[in-house]
Amino acid sequence: MTGFKKIFTVIFVLLSVLLFGQFDRNKTYTYQELNNILELARSNNDNETLAEVYLKLGDYEGDYFAEYDKSLKYYNYAINHFKATKDSDGILRANHAIARRYRDAGLYTEALQILLNLEKTYSEDEKTHALTLVWFDLNLTYRQIGEYQMAMKYLNKAAQANHILKDTLLELRILFSKIEAFESTFERDSAIMLAFEAFDISKKIENNEMAAQSLFYIGYINKMKGEYVKAEKYIGKSLEILPFQAYSERRKRIYKELSEVYNATGRAEMGYAFLLNYTMLSDSIANKNRLESFNNLALKYGSKEKQTSIELLKIEKEYEISKNLMQRRSLYILGFGLLIVLLSVYFIVKFYNQQISTAKIINDQKQEINQQQIRELEDTIRINSMRSMIEGQEIERERIAKDLHDSLGGLLSAVKLQFDYLGSINKGMSSDKSYSQAHHLLDTAVSEVRTISRNLQPSSLQDLGLVPAIRDLINRFKGDNYPDIDFQYYEMPDKMDRMIALTVYRIIQELLNNSLKHAQANEILIQLNAEDDELVIQYEDDGVGFDMNNLQQKGMGLENIKTRVNFVHGVMHTESEPGNGMSVIIRVKYAQS
């Protein structure tokens, strides 16, 4: 009966292939399933399936058995069968797999040669997605040999191409590669900004694994900076949202880093608990790997007992065939007929279920489209209203500033000249205390009018540009009664939309006013830099901070800033804790499309 079961299994697999179609290269198969399919493809002389199966077997040999020679042998078998079917795309994919295997084996020169040839071919054929993957692998290979400049060049190429492809998972892999590159060159602030960006993307696509990895990078880099409070916060959040896997390498590393963070902050008991978790998980993974290695090797090579069993099965098979040939044929026919009936019923039920599901999906999509259109219309109305309000405010500020400067300022200047003239012709009056006080109040009034006029409409912004205008703003707060303000800027654009520049100026002005009025800060850092078509504003102070969950406290001017950021379609990220100051990162596009 064992031989009968084996034959029935082979026939069932053959029927499945005939009914459900060809081998699916995007599906995951076990090593045994691949060998079964390989036998079937050989018996049918199916070169297309043979090529794809050999490609996957090559991946198995390298990934699970570390048998690089056999892995490369299977890839070459795949290339021969792709040639037989004249599948040029398959040949290129097999060569790409060979390049990755060379990199795993430490043969970086050979890997680079193949990848560079693939880059040329895919560029000529305009196969953007395949070319982008080659660029990403070139980045990894150059980084392995320490050529970080070339690695970053190809990583940037992959990132630019993916802006068009919009492959979200590839975008996240690119971001993680950039984070690791920045971390290795100690550009940790840039690495943290990219990690926040990766976290936002992961949340949008609801990929908790990628989101957990993003949070881990944020926490890990803060740990390397000595910011243990932030490190504990983000690594802990990473652990909370990481999907459970029984033998997770990422969870093991999280345990290790949390152990070190708690030890560094003097909480040895918590550190020991996580170290214990790390040790137990490491042992479990090691045992699992040993067991999997044994099972895979047993599956691959077999054993003497298995060979003996096979010989016995052959003898039993011959005996059963000769004795029960007619009985088996009847059972095959009966089983095949029953299978056809069951499949027919299944497809009929599935067809009607799909019809019902399709109708429901279409109805839901229509409702969602209608809701989306309503939301878009509301957003458009709100943005137009906000634009009109802000533009109206700026026009009114400009009018008031001109009136103050031209009318009241001119009048006060004229009065001051008259005072000075009276003092010059009447020497005794200048020594009079009342005259001196009036003269001092008049000077104060002229200065106050000038300050109010500059706050309402900074002339330096229109005459000199954004950077000089911000310098002029900061210069008003110099002295013993004000905190130290450090203003830095990098690669600022030559041209910027007037309303964007004015909005950025108002944002920084509002942030400064908040810090001066409420934060009790000793140091303030303002950074401006351009990345692609975006202007990045980074603002930090070491003041008293506030509780992000306390909406009443959080509203200290931040809502006004958020309104201006929304007005220019920007993105704002705020961090603060009581006693730990405030950090704000804002991104806006500096040129209107």
Image (cartoon, rainbow, N blue to C red):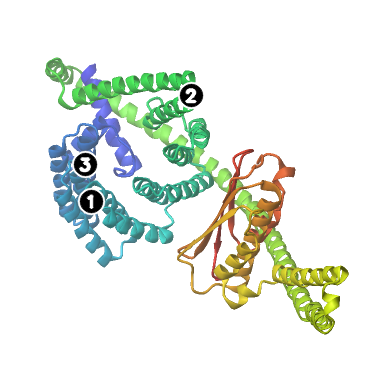
Quarter of the rendering containing residue 113: bottom left
Distance from Cα at disc 3 to Cα at disc 2 = 40 Å
Label count reads: 3
Of the image marks 3 and 1, the number of the one nearer the N terminus:
1
Q: Secondary structure at mark 1?
A: helix
Can residue 373 be seen in the rendering of this structure? yes
Label 2 sits on what residue type? Gly
Q: How far across and how far down the image is residue 11, in percent?
A: 26, 31
On screen, residue 317 versus residue 175, left or right, reads: left
Quarter of the rendering containing residue 216: top left
Which residue, given by chain and number where applicable, does mark 2 sit on?
Answer: 266
Q: Residue at x 48, y 24 (%)?
A: 266
Label 3 sits on what residue type? Asp
Above or below residue 542? Residue 307 is above
| Quarter placement of the N terminus | top left
Q: Which mark is residue 104?
A: 3
Which residue, given by chain and number where applicable, does mark 1 sit on?
Answer: 96
Q: Secondary structure at mark 3?
A: helix
Q: Nearer the viewer, residue 429 or 564?
A: 429
Above or below residue 455? Residue 139 is above
Camera-side mark, 3 or 1: 3
On screen, residue 367 versus residue 237, left or right, reads: right
Label 1 sits on what residue type? His
